[in-house]
Image (cartoon, rainbow, N blue to C red):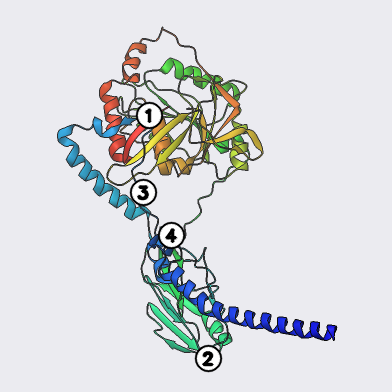
Amino acid sequence: MKWDGMRRDGMTWSVEITRTLQRAAVVCVIILPILYLVIVYYRPEELRREVPTIQKSLSPQSHLPPPGPCTCPGGSVLLKDHIPKDQYEKVAKRRAKELQQHKARTTSVLSRLLIALPNSPLQYPIQGFTVRPLTTTPIPGLALHAEQRSSYKVSLNVSKGVLTMENLAEGVKVQGGGGTRLIMESSSLVILNDALAKVIYTSTIYHIHTGDLASFQFENHEAVFPITIKQPQLPVLHDMGTDINSHVTIATKTFLRYPQLKVLLSSIRSFYSNIEVIIADDSFEPEHITGEHIRQYFMPPAQGWFAGRNLAVSQVTTKYFLWVDDDFLFTENTKIEKLVEVMEAIPELDVLGGTVQGNQFYFSLLYEEGEETEGGCLYRKSQGKFQSLPGYPKCFLASGVVNFFLARTDAIQRVGFDPKLQRVAHSEFFMDGLGSLLVATCDHVSIDHQPKTGNNKDNGRYASFRNPGNNDVEFKLQLHFFKNHLKCIKYG
């Protein structure tokens, strides 16, 4: 009987527990949806923004925010202070117009930020889909991965082309073929995906490099992917031949320093008897330099440093040229072949500097774009460098190097040297090439500098041109303000 009573008490306890659990389950069923509604719809505004709707995520987050004002490092030169106050407003207006034209040439819809939404059933190309202008091209990789439905309906939208089908498949309804919008519907997912694999895009505009954004939609899902519209470029290749003379041309600029130039040429011939040397000469009383494999080009007097560089480089026909100053001196350590070896091993490189009398001068350029009205901030940091070159631990990437460098001819010709800069100008070339030229420096190839002598009748005259006056400095700062759209610049 005792056990019987215990069993009855246990059964009663079990029934009570069961009823309690049932009541708790009912309460949970009622409370949980209420909590969900409270969390989603009545939470603070900043929390609601953390889970954006499909609509919101495609619009405000689709573009990078415009850059804000940049911060000028301590010691920077504020360039607008060097524009005459009575001219500033007109200069700033012209600069703003030029900036908009620059952006029109260098930006497109391909620079738009695209955000991939989570758990999308849409498959599409995210990178590398390139078409030629006015050419028909199938869109690769389009597909839908969705659960069972009675019908599947997708749409595609473009703006700079038209969408067509290669062959109209049975079992799929197509609307809008031949226009900018294409709608496809089928009761079979397999048939729909077969049809998507046959969608063709045809660019309707001619442009050498632009793009389109395609919108791919299914129910409340939308994906946007880029289409690059680009005219292919012909490769420009150099037959380098078998020796250093067919690989490299030596280029230099001279002005009132013929004694130094002759010493340089003699030292070159001590090590490279047949290499081509190009001389750009803007001296007042030109002196003809004779010799095998020497080409001297005369300019109007005192045209300046960068104008001479442009002339010399424009006449180079080899894959590379070696830039030297007219008062340098070749030694047994001036091994051009070693520089060519690095450039050939790392074909992305455009400029490779060496050392001048043990001085491995190089610098990094730190640039913040800034906002449109004020402009950007630039910091030229001496001895600033980046990582070493793979396989060449003594070589480092940088933004600019010393006046002794090997360069890829076609890359330098594309950037050019601004002939407005007539006197001291070197860093400015690398500023113009920032983002276009990949630059490095090595310490295992060097050249010497000739000792200074006082027996040249043109030394004093040369110094008056070599050392810029205040007007030249002011002009350079004004040029940076307008041409490079800079707010400030610091040399450190």
Regarding residue 470, the answer to whether it shows in the image is yes
Q: Quadrant of the N terminus?
A: bottom right
Earlier residue among tags 3 and 1: 3
Q: Residues within 10 Å of mark 4 (few under 14, many from 20)?
A: few
Q: Residues within 10 Å of mark 3 (few under 14, many from 20)?
A: few
Relative depth, front residue between 293 and 76: 76
Depth check, mark 2 against mark 4: the one in front is 2
Q: Among all residues in the image, which is located at the extreme front?
A: 1
- Identify the residue under disc 1: 74
In the image, what residue type sits under mark 2? Answer: Ser
> Mark 3 near mark 2, Cβ–Cβ under 8 Å?
no
Number of the label disc, if any, that sits on residue 118: none
Q: Is residue 172 above or below residue 372?
A: below
Q: Quadrant of residue 59?
A: bottom left
Q: Quadrant of residue 335?
A: top right
In the image, what residue type sits under mark 1? Answer: Gly
Q: Who's the residue at 51% across and 54% down the image?
A: 235
Q: Who's the residue at 58% across and 42% down the image?
A: 240
- Identify the residue under disc 4: 113
- Residue 192 % position (x, y): 53, 85
Q: CA distance from mark 2 to mark 4?
A: 35 Å
Earlier residue among tags 2 and 4: 4
Q: CA distance from mark 1 to mark 4?
A: 33 Å
Q: Who's the residue at 32% across and 19% down the image?
A: 465
> Mark 3 near mark 1, Cβ–Cβ under 8 Å?
no
Q: Residues within 10 Å of mark 2 (few under 14, many from 20)?
A: few
- Identify the residue under disc 3: 67
Q: Secondary structure at mark 3?
A: loop
